[in-house]
Image: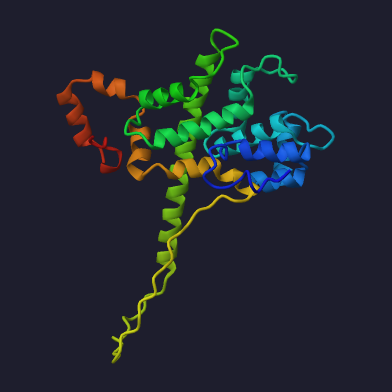
Amino acid sequence: MDLKGKLQPGNPDDKGFAKIEMLLEATGGLSLSQVCAVTGLEGSTIQNWVKRGWVEHPLGKRYEEVHIARILIINALKECIKLEHIAQLMSYVNGKSQDGSEAIIKESTLYNYLCEALKQSGQTDDHSKSGVETVINNVIKDYSDPNPDSRIRIRKALTLMIFACVCTDVKRRVDAMMGQILIDLDKPKQAAPLPKIELIPEPVPVAPEPVEVLEDIIETRKTVSQALREWDISSVERIIIDHDEDAHNAAPVEEEEKKQNNKPWYVRKTPK
């Protein structure tokens, strides 16, 4: 199978789990080393998840769709949610049976929903909890309900997943900022250099624009983080601070303004 022609940037099918599905179709299943390349995880980590029952045992040492989708979901949530709680969340969605008889959705589809919901949420101005739920309803509009409450369970799970992913993104930004501050602290103080006098000014080099291109199958692990990049700083702040807009609107205007003025700048609600 010629994968290169199908995995070009901009291809509408080149998102979420699509790349993995193409690779599985070509290989019939991935080895542990291939799963590590796709997810960026250590083999010992994946084997530990299998041992603990959070991921099903591979079939003949080959990891198929159900295994990889679960690994990708766990990997997207593990920095914000305890691994035991992620396992319980997946049981809430798809039951505890190993044969999948209680499942209400393919986990690869759930992963696709998560990626698309993150992307659409980052492109909207309403980042309250109700705004996120509106996006989720749009993303899962074509979902076929096997049970009366299955759509409700999927919507609740996706809402939790989106908040977890955004919190993870905020944590990474904080860590990066803290890392830069630590670097600045370690820099030795140097005297200002003397001005350089030149008869002919040298041309100023222009830094190339950073370009992000997904051309290789191993870049699939960045799908969620790329969707998060579409959020600007104010969007990330608002979805955390404004997580329950209905509760804010219920309070009297005067009391709300008083509360906002008493809060530190970094938790004040961003005005619309």
201 shown above or below 136: below
Instruction: State which quadrant residue 234 falls in.
Output: top left
Asked if residue 271 lies left or right of residue 115, the reply is left
Asked if residue 210 lies left or right of residue 29, the reply is left
In the depicted view, which residue is nearer to us: 40 or 148? 148
Instruction: State which quadrant residue 192 falls in.
Output: bottom left
Instruction: Point out residue 62 in the picture as x, y percentages from the top left corner.
Output: 80, 37
**At x 40% / y 60%, what residue is drawn?**
181
Instruction: Point out the image quarter for the C terminus.
Output: top left
**At x 17% / y 30%, what residue is drawn?**
258
115 shown above or below 189: above
**At x 55% / y 42%, what residue is drawn?**
11
Instruction: Point out residue 173 in the picture as x, y percentages from the top left corner.
Output: 43, 49
Q: Which residue appears farthest toward the right when viewing the image? A: 60
Instruction: Point out residue 162 in the picture as x, y percentages from the top left corner.
Output: 47, 32
Instruction: State which quadrant residue 230 falls in.
Output: top left
97 shown above or below 117: above
Asked if residue 4 lies left or right of residue 63, the reply is left
Q: Which residue appears farthest toward the left when viewing the image? A: 254
Instruction: Point out residue 178 in the picture as x, y percentages from the top left corner.
Output: 43, 55
In the depicted view, which residue is nearer to us: 256 or 133? 133
Q: Which residue appears farthest toward the top when viewing the image? A: 148
**At x 53% / y 38%, what residue is drawn?**
12
Number of residue marks: 0
Asked if residue 18 lies left or right of residue 64, the reply is left
Instruction: Point out the image quarter for the N terminus.
Output: top right
